């Protein structure tokens, strides 16, 4: 098991180190100016200098992302249940949902900013909520509706009503779909929380730090905050991934069995 | 067929089923079908596709309502029999739930009956003993072969001790050898439990091997062409090589050919 874990963990780390090494050598060898592309070692220096500021900015942005992620996910799940229950609603709402989904939601941020005070984080959280809503809603709805008809028939043969079919077939069937949606949404929540910061509101997040560092020609600092944003996106994804494993232990067992 | 004083397992009287009545896609799936299945008997429904054999099975299961006639199961209306879980059902696909272990799959109908955990588990293990999968109780369905999954599905169907077992091409997805093995197993189990069986099948040898009576059906509209008695006594592996067994297969095959031919000429007339 540990050998297996090692096989899983070591190769990506090696690839990352090689990538950073090549980057460093490339910048040194070609004498590339820091404003074009700084060296990884230079970025690392900035990271250690900026540690406290990064931590604070990441906390601010992360809070927005988490709150948006949770509220969007809850709204998506609830609406998926409603849409599953009421066919009319499903048929009316689904095209609308697809239309809104096709719209770049972060573009709404300036409008949301006008609705709330200049120091409010609500517009950002709202943007994240909407961005997260769709992948969760669409996936969960698919999971609830795309059930094996034979399984439903089987439950009917046990004299089960709609509520029991929902509990015993549809909900368990929707679980893997929920996590597929959540894994997409987790990364999206971080991206949208950061991008929303570019468009006004309080100046306390990773996105704000990146823009202000870049406009002050502090390229190493800007890259340090980009690295922090990258790590945060990863943390969110891994969080969703771990939640999936915990919620559905049989899935990972199955994946391991199929991997051989 | 049923001796006086004993209730038939299934009593189908003048049953018809029309889908999409009055609409352009109207289909007369069944017309004037009557059939009595005695308790302890095993009956196979066979016929070309579109003959309504699966529809008939679903009418018995009360998964569909007839548009004419009545269906009585175990002396009650089909709806009441479904409420009381008087039958178990198995399909071509085992339809096991991936998120449940083998034992918990078998427990599902018992859960819905409100049995407590301990009693459910004991019953599931007893059923697994019966289908000889005791060691797989805590495995997940995907760890089992197709034949083993189908055995679990049968164990699940029988876990409520139903007097009647309904099966829709239960062994259709299995290879020939597994299939024969499963047929033998099924007969052993049903003999042991005294279960009445109604099954839909495409396979003539399977019908003749498993059933006391083979109901040959014809399409458009679905109706019973003939009921063939199969008095072959207790089935053993030797039965499969018996001359009488082959004679019955030939008899059913010729009936089906007649059915197919008339269905084709009917289509040609269109």
Image: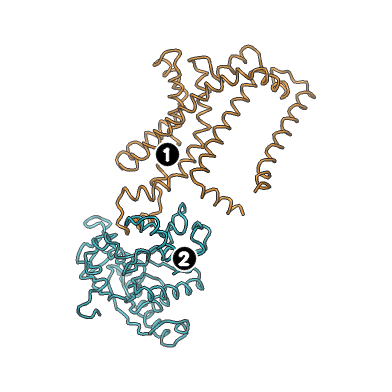
Chain colours: A orange, B cyan
Question: Which chain letter matches label 1?
Answer: A
For label 2, the SS is loop
Q: Which mark is residue A118?
A: none
**Depicted B32 relative to depicted A174: above or below:** below
Number of labelled discs?
2
The residue nearer to you, when weighing B134 against A174, is B134
Residue at figure coordinates x 39%, y 50% from the top left: A169
Quarter-wise, where is residue A29 in the image?
top right
Left or right, A110 with reference to A16: left
Q: Which mark is residue A138?
A: 1
Q: Which residue is mark 2?
A: B173
Same chain for mark 2 and mark 1? The answer is no
The residue nearer to you, when weighing B128 against B122, is B122
Quarter-wise, where is residue B236 in the image?
bottom left
Residue A36, given in percent of the width and then of the height, sits at 69, 19
**Depicted B14 relative to depicted A66: above or below:** below
Question: Which chain letter matches label 2?
Answer: B
Residue at figure coordinates x 46%, y 43% from the top left: A177
Q: Quadrant of the C terminus of chain A?
A: bottom right
């Amino acid at each position: 098991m540990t050998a297996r874990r090692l096989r899983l963990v070591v190769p990506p780390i090696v690839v990352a180190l090689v990538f950073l090494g090549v980057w460093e050598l490339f910048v040194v060898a070609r004498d590339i100016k820091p404003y074009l592309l700084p060296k990884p070692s230079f970025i690392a220096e900035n990271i250690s200098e900026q540690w406290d500021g990064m931590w604070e900015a990441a906390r601010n942005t992360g809070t927005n992302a988490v709150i948006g992620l949770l509220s969007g996910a809850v709204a998506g799940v609830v609406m998926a249940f409603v849409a599953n229950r009421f066919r009319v609603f499903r048929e009316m709402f689904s095209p609308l949902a697809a239309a809104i989904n096709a719209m770049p939601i972060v573009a709404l941020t300036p409008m949301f900013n006008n609705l709330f005070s200049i120091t409010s984080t609500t517009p950002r959280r709202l943007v994240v909520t909407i961005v997260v809503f769709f992948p969760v809603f669409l996936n969960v709805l698919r999971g609830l509706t795309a059930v094996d008809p034979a399984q439903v028939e089987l439950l009917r043969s046990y004299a089960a009503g709609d509520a029991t079919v929902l509990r015993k077939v549809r909900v368990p069937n929707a679980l893997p779909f929920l996590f597929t949606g959540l894994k997409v949404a987790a990364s999206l929540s971080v991206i949208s929380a950061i991008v929303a910061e570019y468009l006004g509101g309080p100046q306390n997040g990773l996105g704000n730090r990146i823009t202000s560092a870049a406009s002050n020609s502090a390229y190493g600092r800007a890259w340090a905050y980009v690295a922090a944003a990258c790590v945060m996106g990863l943390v969110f994804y891994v969080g969703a991934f771990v939640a999936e494993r915990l919620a559905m232990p049989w899935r990972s067992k199955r994946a391991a069995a199929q991997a051989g | 067929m049923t001796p006086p004083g004993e209730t038939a397992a299934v009593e189908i009287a003048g049953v018809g089923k029309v889908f999409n009545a009055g609409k352009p896609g109207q289909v007369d799936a069944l017309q004037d079908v009557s059939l009595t299945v005695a308790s302890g008997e095993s009956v196979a429904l066979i016929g070309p596709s579109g003959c309504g054999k699966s529809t008939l099975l679903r009418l018995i299961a009360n998964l569909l309502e007839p548009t004419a006639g009545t269906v009585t199961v175990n002396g009650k209306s089909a709806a009441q029999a479904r409420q009381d879980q008087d039958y178990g059902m198995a399909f071509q696909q085992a339809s096991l739930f991936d998120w449940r272990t083998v034992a918990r799959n078998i427990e599902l109908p018992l859960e819905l009956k409100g049995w407590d955990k301990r009693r459910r588990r004991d019953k599931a293990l007893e059923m697994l003993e019966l289908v000889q999968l005791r060691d797989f109780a805590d495995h997940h369905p995907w760890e089992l072969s197709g034949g083993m999954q189908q055995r679990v599905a049968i164990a699940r169907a029988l876990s409520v001790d139903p007097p009647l077992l309904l099966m829709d091409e239960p062994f259709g997805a299995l290879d020939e050898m597994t299939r024969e093995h499963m047929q033998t197993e099924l007969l052993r189990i049903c003999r042991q439990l005294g279960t009445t069986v109604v099954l839909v099948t495409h396979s003539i040898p399977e019908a003749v091997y498993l059933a006391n009576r083979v109901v040959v059906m014809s399409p458009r509209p679905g109706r019973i062409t003939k009921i063939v008695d199969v008095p072959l006594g207790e089935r053993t592996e030797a039965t499969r090589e018996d001359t009488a067994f082959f004679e019955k297969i030939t008899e059913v095959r010729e009936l089906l050919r007649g059915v197919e031919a008339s269905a084709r000429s009917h289509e040609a007339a269109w």
